[in-house]
Image (tube, helix red, strand yellow):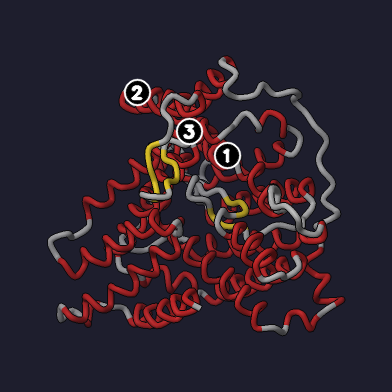
Amino acid sequence: MKNYFEFEKLGTNYRREIIGGLTTFLAMAYILAVNPGMLSLEGVPDIPDAMRMDKGAVFTATALAAAIGSILMGLLARYPIGLAPGMGLNAFFAFSVVLGLGIPWQTALTGVLFSGIIFIILSLTGLREFIINSIPEQLKLAVGAGIGLFITFLGLQNANIIVGNPNTLVALGDLTSAPVLLAVFGLVISVIMMVRKINGAIFYGMIITMIVGIATSVIAKPTAIVSKVPDISPTFGAAFEPLMNDPASLMTTSFVVVVITFLFVDFFDTAGTLVAVATQAGLMKGDKLPRAGKALLSDSVATVSGAILGTSTTTSFVESTAGVAAGARTGFASIVTGFLFILALFFSPILMAVTPEVTAPALIIVGALMVKTLGDVKWNEFEIAVPAFLTMIAMPLTYSIATGIAIGFVFYPITMTMAGRRKEIHPIMYVLFVLFIAYFAFLAD
């Protein structure tokens, strides 16, 4: 086991990998509560029940899809990256596709299934790996830093330290609120342990914050430890129903657009996350991502599995950087994360204590760790500085990793060409330039 995961070469051990895998799981665990509510359109009044997915079934599908994806990533690619149904993609599924376009959720699952199958084909042909390895190193550095800013913003927002404001878009939250104070406490404790160089500081910070939250009644005390696994039958295999019962519904322009959107966003979200996590863990080899093809194949298979089980697109989670910060360096940590998702099926009451206030400090600290890549960006070369900056800043401002990548990749060929450095641009970047322009044109429509 140690030889397969190269523990000695990467300077790790079972303890660090287990703590890292557990930290990643805790940082991702919110998806088990958020995804069922999202796909069931919880809180959306006055819509037919047929538009709502069964919440219990989605919970089970979410946990199983996360387990399959994380374990595959660990075994095949050997990267410390956890997978689960992605935020953003689940919102697009529920609110844009089902609620906005009126497409039945069964057909939306078919769209996820098709996008996953296309992913697998692209992964097996090596095209996805080729594209990722064609991205300039300077943009990869910017992507990592941008994701750092993005997840920091997520953490601040989840804890209500930063809130929405109709006049200024964002503003400082209520620092007298008990949940906000709990998150601030967790951040301070975690930072102190990080400064003192305590191994697993982020993980211990989350545990301490959770205990304090329960002790002060900010977090509800779990009413039970073990619960029955919800029935998955309402969603399992539903992705095949339109193929068998209503194939004409798959021949529409709307359905094709849905598949392409799932494909596009997952492709570049995954690419950005892989590069960011691998860079933070010190796993990049020069400008290349080792075993990128296997990592992308794991992601693709996870998407197909999730669609069959009954959930939106399964993708690599940027919260995996929390596990890396806690010491994870190999796929063994991902396997730990995967098995914890299986256990979570039986311990959902305890997971309810892992609230956004508990996970927010981890996300904020990891974001701070990730922006260190900015030091390697060639800021004195304006033709590089502009696309790098736009890539980085657009991610939190547009609330999308894929959009940030798209903006930077549109500007890179322009600035480099105008600077007389056209020969340094990989041909694939011109192809991506055209595709991203078309993507923005589609968004405008």
N-terminal label among 3 and 1: 3
Numbered circles on residues, count? 3
* Label drawn at residue 25: 1
Q: Tell me what residue is drawn at x 16 percent, y 67 percent.
A: 382
Q: Relative to residue 125, is residue 205 depicted above or below?
A: above
Amino acid carrying mark 1 in the image: Phe
The residue singled out by tag 2 in the image is: 192
Q: Is disc 2 placed on a helix, strand or loop?
A: helix
Amino acid identity at mark 3: Arg
Look at the picture and state if 143 lies above or below 384.
Answer: above
Seen in the image, is 171 located left or right of residue 253? left
Which residue position is annotated with label 3?
A: 16
Up the image or down, 438 lies above or below 217; here it is below
Mark 2: few, some, or many residues within 10 Å (few <14, many ≥20)? some
* Residue drawn at (40%, 22%) of the image: 189
- Camera-near label (2 vs 3) is 2
Label 1 crowd bin: few (<14), some (14–19), many (20+), radius 10 Å: many
The secondary structure type at the circle numbered 3 is helix
The answer to whether the residue labelled 2 contacts the one labelled 3, judged by CB atoms less than 8 Å apart, is no
Quarter the N terminus occupies: top right
Give the residue type at disc 2. Answer: Ile
Of residues 136 and 356, the one nearer the viewer is: 356
Q: Where residue 385 is drawn, which disc sits there? A: none
Q: Is residue 58 left or right of residue 143?
A: right
The image position of residue 397, as x and y in percent, is 38, 56
Q: Residue at x 83, y 70 (%)?
A: 241
Q: Nearer the viewer, mark 3 or mark 1?
A: 1
